[in-house]
Image (spheres, rainbow, N blue to C red):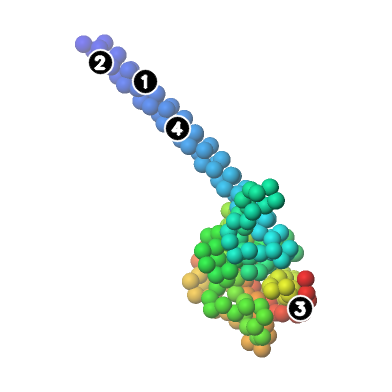
Amino acid sequence: MQNQKVIISKNNRLIVKRCILVISLLLIIFGIVLFSNNISNNNHISKVDSESLKAFFSHNNINAEMKTTEDNSKKEIINYMAVIEIPSINLIHGIPYPGKDNTVDRNIQIINPISLPDMVNGNFILASHSGSSSISYFKKLNKIKENDKVYIYYDNVKYIYKVNNQYLVDKGHVSIRRDHSQSTLTLITCDKKDDTKQLVVIAYLQNTEKY
């Protein structure tokens, strides 16, 4: 009887080990599939962004999300309203019109109330994530310095801003400290060191030129 109990106990341990092995293999397979899907999704986002930038600078924006190419295939395009470029942090990215694409969960978002770059003494406010994901377009914003140039391309005009100030505020309530007698660009993202804070960058318009 005692030998039978020992055998049953060994069998139970063997079953448990096999179950653990199967579960571990399933988790590994799931992780690989999830990782592959993330890479595929990031590549797709990058390709769409690249094609959308080409369309913007070729002055060939469209109101539809799909554009027919020369070989009659369909190419996904985001109709950008503007483009932001910050050479010092190697950033260039489109800013969609207000709507489903204009969100920090996909793009650089325009924050309401909207004050466009061509509004005299207005404040064009943009926000984006600062993490490590493919949609964290402001992930290097903390490295920007005073007097760095920021360019906004909008309605065939290149707006040239110079960074004047940057500061931290509590998350959830952004206090914008700026000179209201100047046309302003405000950039907002989460602070990398303290997730209860947000980084605010203030830049003032210096000049404009056609592009």
Task: Kindly indicate whether the residue at mark 4 contacts the one at mark 3 (C-beta within 8 angstroms).
Answer: no
Label 4 or label 1, whichever lies nearer to me, is 4
Disc 1: CA contacts within 10 A as few (<14), some (14-19) or many (>=20): few
- Looking at marks 3 and 4 on the same chain, the residue that comes earlier in the sequence is marked by 4
The quarter of the picture where residue 157 lies is bottom right
Label 2 or label 4, whichever lies nearer to me, is 4
Q: Position of residue 50 (x, y in %)?
A: 68, 55
Circle 3: element type: strand
The residue at 52%/67% (across/down) is 99
Looking at numbered disc 1 in the image, what kind of residue is underneath it? Leu
Task: Kindly indicate whether the residue at mark 3 contacts the one at mark 1 (C-beta within 8 angstroms).
Answer: no
Residue position marked by numbered label 4 in the rendering: 26
Residue position marked by numbered label 2 in the rendering: 5
- Looking at marks 4 and 1 on the same chain, the residue that comes earlier in the sequence is marked by 1
Q: Nearer the viewer, residue 133 or 94?
A: 94
The quarter of the picture where residue 204 lies is bottom right
Looking at numbered disc 3 in the image, what kind of residue is underneath it? Thr
What separation in Å lies between label 2 and label 4 (alpha carbons)?
31 Å
**What mark, if any, has residue 29 been given in the picture?**
none
What separation in Å lies between label 1 and label 2 (alpha carbons)?
14 Å
- Looking at marks 2 and 3 on the same chain, the residue that comes earlier in the sequence is marked by 2
Q: Position of residue 105 (x, y in %)?
A: 53, 60
Q: Residue furthest left?
A: 1
Task: Kindly indicate whether the residue at mark 3 contacts the one at mark 2 (C-beta within 8 angstroms).
Answer: no
Looking at numbered disc 2 in the image, what kind of residue is underneath it? Lys
Q: Nearer the viewer, residue 68 or 50?
A: 68
Circle 4: element type: helix
Drawn side of residue 48 relative to residue 17, left or right? right
**What mark, if any, has residue 208 been given in the picture?**
3
The residue at 73%/73% (across/down) is 156
What separation in Å lies between label 4 and label 1 (alpha carbons)?
18 Å
**What mark, if any, has residue 14 been given in the picture?**
1
